[in-house]
Image (cartoon, grey):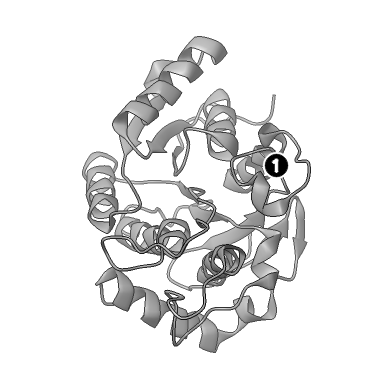
Amino acid sequence: MSASLSGRTVLVTGATAGIGYETARLLARRGAVVLLHGRTSEEAQAATDRLIATDGIDSGLLRPLAADFVRLEEVENLAHAVVREYRHLDVLVNNAAIAAPERHTLTADGNEVAFQVNFLAHYLLTNLLEPALTSDPGGRVVNVSSSLHRTGAIQWNDPQRVRRYSRLAAYAQSQLALTVFAADPRVTAVSVNPGVCATGLLPLYGHEGAPAAEGAQHVVRLCDPAIEIVNGAYYDRSERVAPAPAATEDRTVKRLNKLAALLVGHTA
């Protein structure tokens, strides 16, 4: 059993399945209070019940929360609910992600769906939670990224990919944006590629994946205040490596912030 995380509060997005679920499970087993986010309250509650029933986790450590990241208004409501209830949040794990659909799809907010769910929703959530994200030692944001961020390019003139759409390019763009976002100086953040795991995203990678619990271990490790991190660092599983060059360029970080603030309707 690794060191206790009791007394720490962690919000995990996309915690109802795959790496998010396993991350929530491992954190709660180490005594952290886990705010378990799901797309719907039914899904979040079901995941919570499953953790209590199958892992014997104390229900007092789990709090189901819901927001469909396809609607930015729900992301705002989620952030406000967390700030109201928890004066401080030690860690935010930005994990929720979808594979971009075969056909170009826009959300009601007008954004390409993978760009919104995988990046813009997390951008908005992180900014709104900034007052609660503690600056105590170990307070941090962990963005669950992907090695595919290296193949991505942010289409500055057409971020919604209206003109040319490919699901793989859209997914890679969302992961690159999330990785670049970790270098934003406002909150201490890192990105981690948990490795290819057998989750709903596996078809994008097209080969066999490791168990989700294995990927989750790399995420949980970065949630531990005993692990010192450098803002903007990128980890490939447990190794700190250089991310795609764009992720370390000040100009790209500033430009992405401007674009994201515009698309979520909030000024940076």
For the C terminus, the quadrant is bottom left
Q: Quadrant of residue 256?
A: bottom left
Q: In this view, does 112 lie to the left or right of 172?
A: left
Q: In this view, does 82 lie to the left or right of 225?
A: left
**Residue displayed at 72% across by 47% down:** 196
Up the image or down, 79 lies above or below 86; here it is below
For the N terminus, the quadrant is top right
Q: Nearer the viewer, residue 253 or 129?
A: 253
Residue 159 in the image: state x and y as whole percent. Answer: 44, 77
* Helix, strand or loop for disc 1: loop
**Residue displayed at 59% across by 41% down:** 200
Toward the front, the furthest residue is 103
Residue 42 in the image: state x and y as whole percent. Answer: 32, 27
Q: Which of 226 and 115 is in front in this view?
A: 115
Q: Nearer the viewer, residue 98 or 19?
A: 98
Q: In which quarter of the image is residue 231?
A: bottom right
- Mark 1 residue type: Cys
Up the image or down, 72 lies above or below 93; here it is below
Label tally: 1
Residue 215 in the image: state x and y as whole percent. Answer: 69, 41
Up the image or down, 138 lies above or below 262; here it is above
Q: Name the residue under label 1.
A: 197
Q: Is residue 206 left or right of residue 45?
A: right
Q: Which of 139 and 159 is in front in this view?
A: 159
